[in-house]
Image (cartoon, coloured by chain):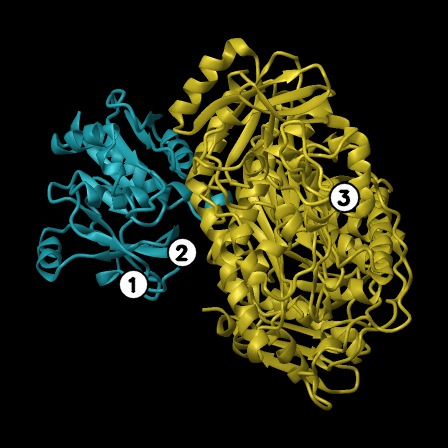
């Protein structure tokens, strides 16, 4: 017998209550609004679908208003935010599709599958718009790997995530061409795993996700639907991590790169043969979000008959079919006459395909089982009517993060500081990670990891794409606005060093719980910086993702906007390199570089608390310097170009020596710690003929520092001291990551 | 002269191999489900993960219709090159001796490796300069070559060990630093490194892989 006050539907079935709605992550007022939109209490299927589409992960309810302030238009933009991925024109009728996405919470619970399916998901976003995936990059954040129980957890997460990324990317034949990783205490409980993918397509082949043509069929193809990943979007992605997360392991999906490889080839061949009206991948919230969003964009309705969905387990509940996050599935709209041809192609690629519904003109999302109606909702209510919340930002009056543990005690000389920096987890060489990935498949990779500041991929006509991903959370924690501007400039600097001009930007905003005023402040300030920097660079945001509620028991992560930027250079053969190469080349420090130790790697090693704010950045001057460096690299007379980032000038010099396998001898006028190890945007280290560097000095600040040569790095300091270190010592320090990575 | 490059649903490097072969001759892809080898004069079994390789690398691919034809083609003396996963498939098909085991470091590993050509007069290396190491990308998780001592002795005496990793380059732990072997008759070769990724300085780090394809063309054209 039903409890007093419980509601039943017309068939006498007990309807879910407010308590059930809350358990699914909805608030009381959201549940009331759903009842109002439905004109009655939602049943179990409907409530499950609303709870997912109205989750933070799907509805962006705490970030959408901010995201609307970002620049999204520009001369190169072909597809902006809202589609599965953004796309920019790269010439000759080709477009580059790209996007970054996070898989943070799944990776914190099960790093191998979390990271693997993160790669799988972002690849599907790329081929869902008709582009062939050509590259993957990743952006990872873990706790410090070197001490105690936390260190062991960080090493476990690192090993699992890197193995998972390699497992998926290597197996599907898409090169992993770059990436970055930082280790900081605030990521210990809540690691970040962001993956970015790029694809290439003819502009006239792009496909959109809007469903169209009432009477057209909906075909689901790829893997069968199972119970994996039920509730991933609401349970994992839209709540803080805490005790008992091991119980959430079943909400993490399991990836199958072979299935995805077939799905990829099948999707592209369907498209090539003109058999698709629209295409959409199944990601978070599975069929529920894919079908509703296709209907919403096309301003049509959709009927789905769950009896037609190929299942992995026969006794799945209707709501489970609708919310399953089983991987490697795509949904397309086709004309009824093409059904046989579509299913024949699915058979060729050995992927299961089934017509599971049709497009209707009623504007309703209906879930059927044969003739029986299991759910009936207005598409607009599901997709567009989730309430958006205003943030209540407030700058925190107390520091949010404890000072990092000191690793460098007392006064140390410049040489010891340099070696300690090079050996620190954030700056040590990344080869132990990169050698787990295939960077060359598809024969486009002109600059592999470690060879240049950005990855470079040759295009058919001889030009090249360049791509970089970055985002230093500690600097954003010190100053959300300037830290984010600096992260965007860092990506642009990486592009400039290979000779590329930015075309567009993608971003993944990884933040804590936005309902807390100090997190809301971080988020608002960061988005302000993101918008301003992208406007200054004419590199609009073409897509991205937001990952909120990244908090563990010990507090929030550092606010971490991960920036991915894609650029173009006219001649792949002239792509810049980062290593010194030619004995006798002059070395110059180029750009408006005013380094400071605030929130620097050296300050971190010393255990300094984060400062309240970073020095001002002259955005115009840095953008002008980027342009000069880019032009100089394109000229083809420079030997190397490297931007000065974490660890400052001394670390940049050491990196140029290590990559090129040759020493250098330079003199600094000041030689104070700020000059050696301070950080700021706007500094570049260039090597080449002295006359070329002097000529550059007519347009941008150039300081000739010394010469390339020998097998030592020698820095003469103004006080008569010299920092003198052999390449072998530098290499030994720089190889420290191997010890943290099996 | 035409190369046929097999394409399994999980192949990854088949288009790279196709384009590399096209630098020296005609080439076309051959679908795994087809028995017709399209009149190819030489076959490349490419890298990748043929049918997912969740069982054992190459264990299923060797039963595919296309591979059945390739086995017959090889028995008739046709030239067959297996690269990486292709090498694994050819070992599973018993066209080559030995087997590829999991790397000694237990991980998928990428590196641009130096290779010594041991047999410079083979149908796969005649156009490679002997005495100068080849620089070629190498990438796999299952590339540790293994055969029993008696087999290895016989292979050595018959000149079946064609390519070895140069000193310090054997990251996978292969016995005798073996990177590539040929069949007793000399018309089938397996190679773990990827010559198709070293045909253009711009993206391959060298053009040293081109010699492998040029050698195959020379062998076919010399025989006709």
Name the mark nearer the viewer: 2 or 1. Answer: 2
Q: Write down the chain letter for disc 1.
A: B
From the image, tell me which residue sits under label 2. B108
For image coordinates 80% across by 80% down, the residue present is A672
Q: Is residue A173 left or right of residue A383?
A: left
Q: Write down the chain letter for disc 2.
A: B
Query: Residue A404: x and y, percent?
Result: 72, 77
Q: Is residue A285 left or right of residue B145?
A: right
Q: Residue furthest top?
A: A337
Q: Nearer the viewer, residue A285 or B67?
A: A285
From the image, tell me which residue sits under label 1. B173
Hey, which quadrant is residue B217 in on the image? top left
Q: Nearer the viewer, residue A628 or B186?
A: B186
**Do badges 2 and 3 share one subunit?**
no
From the image, tell me which residue sits under label 3. A60
Name the tint of chain A in the rendering: yellow
Q: Residues within 10 Å of mark 2 (few under 14, many from 20)?
A: many
Which chain is painted in cyan?
A: B
Looking at the image, can residue A92 be seen?
A: no
Vertical comparison of A727 with A627: above or below: below
Disc number for residue A666: none
Query: Residue A178: x and y, percent?
Result: 58, 52
């Amino acid at each position: 017998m039903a409890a007093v006050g419980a509601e039943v539907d017309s068939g006498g079935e007990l309807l879910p209550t407010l308590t059930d709605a809350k358990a699914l992550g909805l608030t009381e007022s959201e549940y009331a609004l759903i009842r109002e939109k439905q004109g009655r209490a939602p049943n179990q299927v409907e409530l499950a679908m609303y709870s997912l589409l109205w989750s933070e992960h799907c509805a962006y309810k705490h970030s959408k208003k901010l995201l609307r302030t970002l620049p999204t238009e520009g001369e190169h933009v072909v597809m902006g935010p809202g589609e599965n991925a953004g796309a920019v024109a790269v010439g000759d009728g080709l477009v580059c599709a790209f996007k970054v996405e996070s898989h943070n919470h799944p990776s914190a619970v099960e790093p191998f599958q979390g990271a693997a399916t993160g790669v799988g998901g972002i690849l599907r976003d790329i081929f869902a718009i008709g582009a062939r995936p050509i590259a993957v990059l990743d952006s990872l954040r873990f706790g410090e790997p070197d001490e105690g129980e936390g260190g062991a957890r960080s090493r476990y997460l690192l090993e699992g995530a890197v193995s998972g990324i390699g497992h998926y990317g290597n197996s599907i034949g898409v090169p992993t061409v770059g990436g970055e990783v930082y280790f900081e205490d605030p990521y210990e409980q809540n690691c970040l795993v962001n993956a970015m993918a790029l694809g290439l397509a003819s502009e006239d082949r792009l496909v959109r996700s809007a469903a169209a043509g009432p009477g057209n069929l909906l075909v689901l193809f790829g893997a069968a639907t199972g119970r994996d990943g039920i509730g991933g979007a609401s349970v994992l992605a839209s709540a803080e991590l805490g005790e008992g997360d091991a119980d959430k392991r079943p909400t993490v999906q399991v990836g199958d790169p072979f299935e995805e490889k077939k799905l990829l080839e099948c999707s592209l061949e369907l498209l090539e043969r003109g058999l698709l009206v629209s295409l959409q991948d199944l990601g978070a919230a599975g069929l529920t979000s894919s079908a509703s969003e296709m209907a919403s964009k096309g301003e049509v309705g959709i009927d789905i008959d769950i009896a037609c969905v190929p299942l992995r387990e026969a006794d799945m509940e209707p709501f489970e079919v609708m919310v399953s996050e089983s991987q490697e599935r795509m949904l397309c709209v086709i004309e009824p006459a093409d059904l046989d041809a579509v299913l024949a192609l699915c058979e060729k690629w050995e992927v299961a395909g089934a017509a599971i519904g049709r497009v209707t003109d009623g504007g309703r999302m209906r879930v059927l089982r044969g003739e029986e109606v299991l759910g009936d909702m207005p598409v607009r209510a599901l997709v567009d009517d989730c309430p958006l919340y205003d943030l209540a930002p407030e700058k925190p009056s107390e520091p949010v993060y404890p000072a990092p543990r000191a690793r460098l005690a007392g006064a140390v000389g410049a040489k010891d500081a340099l070696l300690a920096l090079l050996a620190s987890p954030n700056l040590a060489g990344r080869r132990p990670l990169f050698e787990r990935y295939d960077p060359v498949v598809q024969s486009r990779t002109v600059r592999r990891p470690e060879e240049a500041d950005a990855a470079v991929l040759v295009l058919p006509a001889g030009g090249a794409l360049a791509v970089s991903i970055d985002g230093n959370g500690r600097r954003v924690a010190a100053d959300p606005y300037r830290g984010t501007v600096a992260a965007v400039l860092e990506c642009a600097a990486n592009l400039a060093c290979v000779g590329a001009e930015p075309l567009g930007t993608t971003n993944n905003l990884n933040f804590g719980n936005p309902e807390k005023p100090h997190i809301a402040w971080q988020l608002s300030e960061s988005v302000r910086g993101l918008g301003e920097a992208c406007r200054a660079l004419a590199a609009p945001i073409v897509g991205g993702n937001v990952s909120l509620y990244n908090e563990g028991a010990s507090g929030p992560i550092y606010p971490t906007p991960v920036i991915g930027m894609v650029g173009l250079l006219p001649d792949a053969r002239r792509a810049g390199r980062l290593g010194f190469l030619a004995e006798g080349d002059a070395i110059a420090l180029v750009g408006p570089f005013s380094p400071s130790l605030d929130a620097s790697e050296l300050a971190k090693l010393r255990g300094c608390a984060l400062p309240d704010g970073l020095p001002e950045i002259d955005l115009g001057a840095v953008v002008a310097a980027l342009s000069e460096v880019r032009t100089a690299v394109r000229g083809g007379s420079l030997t190397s170009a490297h931007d000065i980032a974490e660890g400052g000038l001394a670390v940049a010099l050491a990196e140029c020596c290590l990559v090129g396998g040759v020493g250098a001898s330079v003199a600094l006028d000041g030689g104070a710690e700020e000059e050696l190890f301070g950080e700021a945007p706007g500094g570049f280290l260039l090597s080449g003929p002295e006359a070329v560097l002097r000529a550059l000095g007519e347009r941008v600040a150039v300081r000739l520092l010394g010469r390339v040569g020998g097998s030592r790095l020698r820095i003469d300091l103004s006080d008569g001291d010299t920092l003198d270190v052999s390449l072998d010592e530098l290499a030994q320090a720089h190889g420290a990551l191997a010890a943290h990575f099996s | 002269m035409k190369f046929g490059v097999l394409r399994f649903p999980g192949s990854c490097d088949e288009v790279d191999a196709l384009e590399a072969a096209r630098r020296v001759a005609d080439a076309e892809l051959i679908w795994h489900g087809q028995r017709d080898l399209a009149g190819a004069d030489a076959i490349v079994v490419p890298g990748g993960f043929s049918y997912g390789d969740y069982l054992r690398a190459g264990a299923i691919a060797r039963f595919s219709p296309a591979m059945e034809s390739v086995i017959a083609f090889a028995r008739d003396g046709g030239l067959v090159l297996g690269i990486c996963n292709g090498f694994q498939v050819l070992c599973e098909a018993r066209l080559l001796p030995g087997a590829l085991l999991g790397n000694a470091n237990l991980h998928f590993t990428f590196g641009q490796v130096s290779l010594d050509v041991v047999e410079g007069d083979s149908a796969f290396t005649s156009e490679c300069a002997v005495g100068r190491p080849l620089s070629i990308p190498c990438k796999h998780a299952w590339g540790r070559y293994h055969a029993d001592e008696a087999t290895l002795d016989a292979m050595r005496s018959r000149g079946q060990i064609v390519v070895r990793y140069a000193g310090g380059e054997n990251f996978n732990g292969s016995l005798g630093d073996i990177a590539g072997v040929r069949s007793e008759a000399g018309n089938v070769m397996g190679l773990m490194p990827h010559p198709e990724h070293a045909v253009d300085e711009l993206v391959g780090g060298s053009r040293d892989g081109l010699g492998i394809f040029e050698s195959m063309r020379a062998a076919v054209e010399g025989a006709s």
